[in-house]
Image: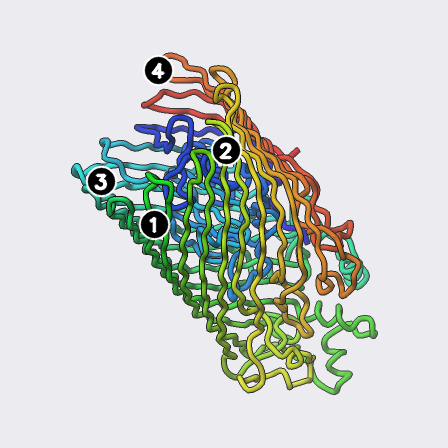
Amino acid sequence: MKRLSPQKRFLLTGCSVAAMLAAPAYAQGDEIIVTAQKRDESIQDVPLAITALSGDFTREVNLDDVKDLVKFTPGVTGNSSDSFIDTLSMRGILTNDFGAGGDPSVGLFKNGLYQGRNGAVVTSLYDMERAEVLRGPQGFLFGRNAIGGAISVHTARPSFDGVSGYVEADVAERDRLFGEAALNVPLSDVFAVRFALYGGHEGGYVDNAAYPNNDPLIEPEKYAGRFSALYSDGPFEAFFTAEYEDRKQSGSVYRATEGGPGWDNLVDIFGVSLGGDGRDIDSDLQLGEADDSEILSLGLQLTYDLGGAVLTSLTGFKDHDYVYAEDFDGTPLGINAYAQDQEGKYFEQEVRVVSDTDGPLSWYAGASYYKEEIDVLFTQAADEEVMCQFYWSYYGINSCSDYFAYYYYAFTPTPEGLVESNAVRGRYHGWAAYVDATLALSEKFDIGVGIRYSKDVKKFAISAPPVTSDLGPYFGVGFTTAEPLEDKQSWDAFTPRFIARYYPADDWMLFASATRGFKSGGFGSFFISPSSVTYCGPFDTSCLGLTNADASPNSFDPEKVWSYEAGVKGKLFGGATRLDANVYYYQYKDLQVNVPGTGGGILVDNVGDVKGWGFEASTTTDIGEYFDLYVAGAYADTDVTDAQPLCDGTLDCEGSSLGYVPKLSASASLNFSYPVGPGAIKASAQAFGQTKTYGGLLKPAYSVNDAYMDLTLRAGCGLERDWICRERHQRALL
């Protein structure tokens, strides 16, 4: 099946009007200041592959949520319009398990706090200070298993510089109306507050041929608000945030590939065909469609300057409810509808001490703790007659009644069809401690060594209620339980990091690093162990009413990686051009991936080894007085071995590359600003593109996702303090 990506859109003329009192920015001269290494540093001095985007930039180019940062970050691909991050890839590393018993491979953080998993992790970008995207294993710096990389966003903080704020409206075709506003109010010399609001609605753009009279799909409606407070007096500072977001939109929409043996079987048996064109779907939507979440986040950061070092405490709490539904098979037949009803809570606490950098030795050390509660009900649905015909028409049986009569049973249809559910309950906690030291051997050369110890403990339970359909639970889940099947396991690891940094000239820095990455093990949400207990079928009761004496949840081992990197950062043409380039190589072991189980379930197992290397670069150039240009690009190459379970049990894909990783990806942004009286005329062009990808290691022709380029053109005018009007002319898939 093909997931229709957000790039497959065509937007015509729209207008965005803003009334602005102040434009927040976080820069020091032309340098963006980041905190990736626990202290304020110019991005040009950070020995990491990192892309930083200012809050002004994210607002100007209409980046709606954190996954939109993909467009301007080399080596990062896989944006989608839903609340899942299983397609988000950094250098080819992504989250392969979409259940609730594992952890994301790409960690997302807001104001230093972990944002969680599918359903809770994706939130809107509004009133931002900056966003930092770090590629490669970042578990040492950020923790929480960020083995592929990390995205760290920072919201605008209250200011003591006076009352300020802005209001912005975004109006476009398809009845799009979104607004964003912020108000900053200093209440005294030491206490200030900030209010920010965001929300709106847009009509859909994907038609469903199965229901031509229904509204189009991919129809976002989001509303969010944030309250921030800052107290700063002498050496002590407290920063508090409270944020709530209500998101309603369509689940992922799929269109069958109309190719391959699976599709050929459907045509032979049912004579199925798809209506609409390549940007439409033709789905029965048996369980409906939804991608709705309510997310509450609280954060408190306390800092105290000890004199020579700064003590920081970070406390976070997150509560979310999430409902999701999609038609995964992408056909008008009832084959595989999927739904997820989830709620979860997450608490975290971190304490660290960061030294100053006055002497040759700088360091930081800290410890963290987290606790998570997650409860999910998964549902899969199908049409009973479709299942009977598909599995048994080869034997001349064309209905469920015929099949049951063959075994001397009577079949009674169920109004809701074949509906199989299973519930999982996760109770997780963990802690980590880390220390890092950097020693300047000379004014131009320094080395750094750090080590982190992490331990994760997971208590997991899975249960499956009886199925009302006479067909039983043998098509999706594969079993039912008389009680929750429970297990508890823990995983730990030491993950070191080594960095060397050299300044050959004032405006140039070279760096090299070696980093150990680790992502803890977990439990599969759709399978149990031993697998023999799910090898059943209709009229077999041995898979029904299982207890802890019969089976336990499917568990899988950690993922591990060694990543090596070298890079350069510098300036050319008197500082008019800033360059950032790096090359990397990694060896990745024991990927946590979904593989077919022996029964109806989906097994998560550790499969294969991956070796990957690539090149990434970005440059920002001031072209004369009125133009600036940003260009970024990446090349990636991967080699997979020992992955037979992903290749129909054969060696046919030995040495193949990861199918979902494009060989080439690139983005560019050309901006123009010409002062006119008290304002300016502005225009910009942004482009993002990538080469083709595939839906698996075997890379059959019907699984190809074609290369594409996404182009956005904008033009407008504005006054510095009173109003701004921007017009978005065209955004097209080429």
Query: Which residue type does callout 2 highlight?
Result: Met
Q: Position of residue 356 (x, y in %)?
A: 32, 42
Report which residue position mark 2 lands on: 509
**Residue 635 drawn above or below residue 317:** above
Residue 530 visible at all: yes
Amino acid type, mark 3: Ala
Helix, strand or loop status at disc 3 = strand
Colour scheme in use: rainbow
Depicted 585 relative to depicted 60: above or below: below
Is the residue under label 2 in contact with that under label 3 (CB below 8 Å)?
no
Q: Is label 3 or label 2 in front?
A: 2
What kind of element bears circle 1? Answer: strand
The kind of residue on which mark 1 rests is Glu
Q: Quadrant of the C terminus?
A: top right
Residue 120 in view (yes/no): no
**How far separated are the C-alphas under marks 3 and 2?**
38 Å
Dot 4 or dot 1, earlier in sequence: 1
**Closer to the N terminus: mark 2 or mark 1?**
1
Amino acid at pointer 4: Pro
Q: CA distance from mark 3 to mark 4?
A: 30 Å
- Quarter of the rendering occupied by the N terminus: bottom right
Q: Which mark is residue 243?
A: 1
Q: Residue at x 37, y 53 (%)?
A: 365
